[in-house]
Image: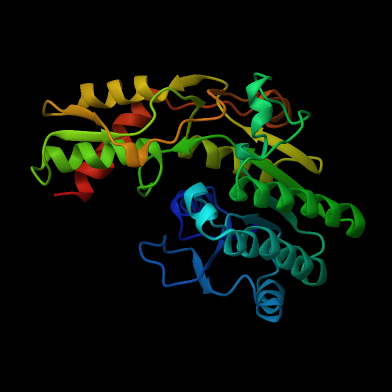
Amino acid sequence: MKVFVTGANGFVGKHLIAALSQRGHEVFAGVRQTMCDVPPSVKVYQYNLLHDEELYRLLKDIQPDGIIHLASQSKVSDSWKDPVATFTVNTFGTIRLMQAAKQAVPKAKIITVGSSEEYGLTGKSIQPLTEEHPCQPQNPYASSKLAMGQIALQLAKKNNLHVIHVRPFNHFGPGQEPGFVISDFASQIANIENNFSSPILKVGDLSAIRDFTDVRDVIKAYILLLEKEINTGIYNICSGITHSINSILDDLLNMSAKPIQVEIDQGRFRPSEVPLFSGSMEKLNKATGWTPQIPFQTSLLDTLHFWRMRIQ
């Protein structure tokens, strides 16, 4: 199968193109900037998601059987700083991709990647969250992802396109940049172990409880949704198992090679409006047979090891 991956140079994209290549797919990586460490069989294309004609020509040239749309502005904090840029990339970029696909490859299966953030305040009263529950997004990032999913499915219905909109819950693993809680903890521990900072780990609110999945399991879900006969619709990707941020920190501290003191940093303290947030993977499991395979402790250790290798 020919597969075009947008945002291939990101955290999830790098894992995804490698896995697709290993499964024998012909992979085309769409990036904004030069990409390093690419599997030999993967073809890399530089393009601008917001340039209609360029995107159309690219899809016309590749003729992919499937498109996995990862390209996005993915940080909630950045979405508050620049909501316009967030909607421009996440929502309008998706519209442009859908329009180009309609003209160039109308039979391609398209997977648009949303977020569990779309559910927002609904998580305050309903657990676990299913695809049927209403969405009440509470930040510009979440709103942009909800809008992209709605418009993608509307365009799919109008133009007879095959679109699957996924809502991955919190995911992490080796390769994730700072700005996400587990990667932030792991990078600080690695710095301390290498004597690059004092043995004090600064944290924000630790009370939240979230549904975490290893990124390597998440991309397996994307691949199964691509390969199997799946109806157009929305699918959660989650473990259904929750962990408190406080317990995750304790686990990582127990893995540390040095004793570390924890200190609350008011600059990082953002109390959560939804203390507990978990999802149901039942629909995805019934459609594909997918379940997470990587133990949570293994994921934590692999993430910490990534930062130990990076910070030396």
Image position of 199 with respect to 32: above or below: above
Image position of 104 with respect to 294: above or below: below
Q: Position of residue 224 (x, y in %)?
A: 64, 39
Front one among 172 and 89: 89
As drawn, is 165 to the left or to the right of 244? right
Residue 19 shows in the view: no
Residue depicted at 41% across the width and 67% down the height:
35
Residue 5 shows in the view: yes
Outermost residue toward the left in this view? 195
Front one among 166 and 115: 115
As drawn, is 37 to the left or to the right of 127? left
Q: Tell me which corner region of the image, top left, top right, bottom left or bottom right, holds residue 283.
A: top right
Front one among 147 and 254: 147
Q: Position of residue 226 (x, y in %)?
A: 67, 46
Residue depicted at 52% across the width and 19% down the height:
241
Count of all numbered marks drawn on residues in the image: 0
Q: Tell me which corner region of the image, top left, top right, bottom left or bottom right, holds residue 155.
A: bottom right
Q: Tell me which corner region of the image, top left, top right, bottom left or bottom right, holds residue 268.
A: top left
Residue depicted at 85% across the width and 52% down the height:
154
Q: Position of residue 227 (x, y in %)?
A: 68, 44
Q: Which colour scheme appears in the figure? A: rainbow
Q: Position of residue 305 (x, y in %)?
A: 25, 38
Residue depicted at 61% across the width and 29% down the height:
290
Quarter placement of the N terminus: bottom right
Image position of 144 with respect to 187: above or below: below
Image position of 173 with respect to 311: above or below: above
